[in-house]
Image (cartoon, rainbow, N blue to C red):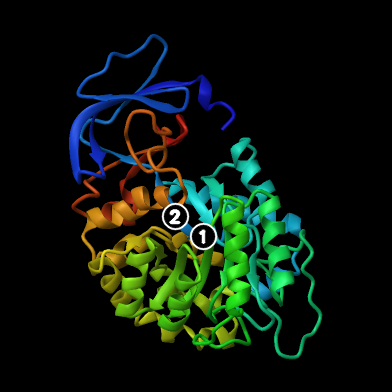
């Protein structure tokens, strides 16, 4: 943010949440030039510093949502590809602002956001969380990001088209597409390893891309110092991706014990997105989700909690994700409520802070209230280490949002 470096800030008298240790301790937090300079039981207030009284409240790291689509202002992704980029940008601005006001100070976009969007937030042109983008997700013909109906043949993959994906076939084409995303500064390259809900012509249990094509994306991402992440539901698709070097799996609703073992062996990440299926079922039609996609929701909805529990108990590194579309973005925080059915609140908070930061390659900088970290901080009523409802209801409990030392909400 353009004005963060000029601010000195002290959060006084709150219970500072140490996510790593799973405890909260009474203390002060001193922020200078957008970074946390000191966390102690008591710190002196520098001349001219702004002071925020956090007494009786909890100071929490800014949240990280590791699977969003910030350009998805509609659940009808095929129709969105024909919208004006200016209209999509206007909706995106509102989506980002809503995320920040729910306490998400960093998001990882998994299809749709680009370098310009990330820069708009970084330069202070838009209010929102910082965006780690992957550009357009890669899909084979007829795959999860090929949003044409069966009777349509025209395909426009122009960079400025506001679609979430790029269709490519064959090793050379896939390699070129990966390089194109990376040359724009993408932090990761996403590829479709299985079918999905929002795509009109594929099956949930289909395998997508050949092994050679997947390996080519992994190689290009690794060569660029980045990583490949894969959309996958079934154990077959997940296991195949992990064996081929994909570092992170999105969703994974239908994994089995063999998948869990592979996650641990490969030190890979899983990003479940349970909230999107709950609301695709109840609100998808109203949000524009086509009928063919509505019919697929139940296949993955019922298995999601079982997969989350299986992965958590098996020691998989689990990040927090939501994957919401259109008018359903407002339910982002309810992922905390859903996960609390199988995970303790402290583990869910860990997913939304420390694990997310590790996935982004920003451990020690994001998702933590420690000296030297970026000053992304929340002040909330209630202890999120013991009550997942605290962060599930930001309208009731969130008092202040600070991003890179700048008070963005409340104060």
* Residue indicated by mark 1: 68
- 10 Å crowding of disc 1: few (<14), some (14-19), many (20+): many
* Residue indicated by mark 2: 65
Q: Residue at x 60, y 82 (%)?
A: 290
The image quarter in which residue 216 lies:
bottom right
Residue 101 image position (x, y, % from top left): 45, 46
The image quarter in which residue 111 lies:
bottom right
Residue 353 vertical placement versus 249 (above, below): above
Task: Give residue 247's mark.
Answer: none
- 10 Å crowding of disc 2: few (<14), some (14-19), many (20+): many
Q: Residue at x 51, y 88 (%)?
A: 295
Q: Nearer the viewer, residue 380 or 15?
A: 15
The image quarter in which residue 217 lies:
bottom right
Element type at marker 2? Answer: strand
Q: Nearer the viewer, residue 38 or 387?
A: 38
Q: Is 243 on the left or on the right of 112, as rendered?
A: left
């Amino acid at each position: 943010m353009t004005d963060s470096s000029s601010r000195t800030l002290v959060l006084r008298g709150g219970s500072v949440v140490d996510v790593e240790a799973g405890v909260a301790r009474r203390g002060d937090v001193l922020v200078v030039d957008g970074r946390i300079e000191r966390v102690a039981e008591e710190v002196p207030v520098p001349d001219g510093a702004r002071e925020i009284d956090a007494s009786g409240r909890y100071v929490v790291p800014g949240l990280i949502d590791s699977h969003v689509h910030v350009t998805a202002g509609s659940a009808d992704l095929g129709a969105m590809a024909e919208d004006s980029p200016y209209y999509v940008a206007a909706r995106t601005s509102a989506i980002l602002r809503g995320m920040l006001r729910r306490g998400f100070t960093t998001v990882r976009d998994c299809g749709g956001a680009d370098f310009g969007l990330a820069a708009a937030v970084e330069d202070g042109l838009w209010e929102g969380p910082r965006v780690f983008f992957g550009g357009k997700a890669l899909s084979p013909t007829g795959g999860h990001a090929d949003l044409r109906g069966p009777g349509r043949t025209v395909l426009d993959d122009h960079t400025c088209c506001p679609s979430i994906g790029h269709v490519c076939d064959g090793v050379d084409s896939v390699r070129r597409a990966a390089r194109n995303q990376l040359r724009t500064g993408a932090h990761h390259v996403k590829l479709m390893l299985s079918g999905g809900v929002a795509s009109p012509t594929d099956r949930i249990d289909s395998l997508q891309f050949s092994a050679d094509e997947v390996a080519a994306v992994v190689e290009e991402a690794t060569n660029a110092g980045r990583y490949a992440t894969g959309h996958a539901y079934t154990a077959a698709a997940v296991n195949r991706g992990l064996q081929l070097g994909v570092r992170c799996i999105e969703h994974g609703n239908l994994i089995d014990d063999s998948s869990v073992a592979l996650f641990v062996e490969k030190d890979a990440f899983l990003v479940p997105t349970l909230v999107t299926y709950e609301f695709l079922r109840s609100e998808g039609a109203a949000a524009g989700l086509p009928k063919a996609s509505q019919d697929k929701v139940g296949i993955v909805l019922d298995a999601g909690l079982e997969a989350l529990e299986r992965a958590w108990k098996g020691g998989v590194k689990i990040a927090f994700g939501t994957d919401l579309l259109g008018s359903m973005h407002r339910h982002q925080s309810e992922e905390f409520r859903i996960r609390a059915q199988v995970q303790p609140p402290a583990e869910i908070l860990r997913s939304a802070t420390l694990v997310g930061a590790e996935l982004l390659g920003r451990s020690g900088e994001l998702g933590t209230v420690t000296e030297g970290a970026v000053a992304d901080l929340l002040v909330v009523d209630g202890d999120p280490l013991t009550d997942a409802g605290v962060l599930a209801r930001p309208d009731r409990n969130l008092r202040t949002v600070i991003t890179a030392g700048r008070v963005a909400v409340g104060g």
